[in-house]
Amino acid sequence: MKVLVLSDSHSALRFMRKCIEKTKPDAIVHLGDYYDDGQTLAEDYPHIPVHQVAGNCDRYRCPIHARELLCYNLGGVMTYMTHGHGERVKSGIGYLVAEARRCGAQVALYGHTHTPDCHREEDGLWVLNPGSAGHSAGILETDGQTVTACYLLTETDLEDMV
């Protein structure tokens, strides 16, 4: 399964649509800050499931039932999804990583910092921040049990795709 991960979109719909058209994901994750952008993508691409959480800028942009944190199976992989403001990621990702491990996640997805990051912790936990949509995105690939690839995409990468 190929999952397109977006965050901090702030109405960068052109970039997000380009990511979808170029990468052809099986699912989309939107990690907040302009929650309604995720809803727009769900309407524009009804055949692609959209999973999303609310960010710190979404107080008046999302339904009352919107969650700020999700931890569930996505593509056969336990996935921790958050915008990151509640985990104070601008001061470091220690708390985020601890919470992801606590829920048994194989991957932790977060945003908020606008700084792209994709790495694997020593214990095997994948950590992905796609950065700010409009400039970068993330791709997570699974085989139904494990993460097989995790990487970042920029506008230049998208231009180079056929």
Image (spheres, helix red, strand yellow):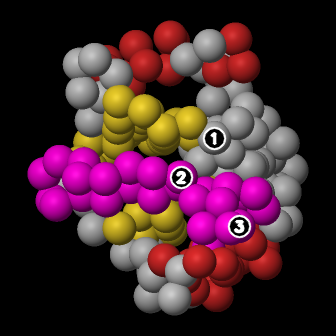
Front residue (pair 105, 147)? 147
> Mark 2 vs mark 1: which is more N-terminal?
1
- Indicate the secondary structure of the residue bearing disc 1: loop
Which percent across, then down, holds residue 114? 75, 39
Residue at the disc numbered 3: 155
Residue at the disc numbered 1: 116
Residue at 51% in and 88% down: 162
Residue at 63% in and 84% down: 43
Label 3, label 1: how far apart the Cα atoms are = 13 Å
Q: Which quarter of the image is occupied by the N terminus?
A: bottom left
Give the quarter of the image for residue 45: bottom right
> Mark 3 vs mark 1: which is more N-terminal?
1
Question: Magenta residues?
Answer: 133-158
- Amino acid carrying label 1: it is Pro
| Left or right, 45 with reference to 133 | left
Please report contact status of discs 2 and 1: CB closer than 8 Å, yes or no. yes
Which percent across, then down, holds residue 136? 67, 56
User: Magenta includes 144?
Assistant: yes
Which percent across, then down, holds residue 155? 70, 67
Label 2, label 1: how far apart the Cα atoms are = 7 Å
Please report contact status of discs 2 and 3: CB closer than 8 Å, yes or no. no
| Left or right, 145 with reference to 46 | left
- Amino acid carrying label 3: it is Glu
Residue at the disc numbered 2: 152
> 45 above or below 50?
below
**Res 112 seen here:** no
Give the quarter of the image for residue 49: bottom left
Residue at 31% in and 59% down: 141
Which percent across, then down, holds residue 102? 31, 18
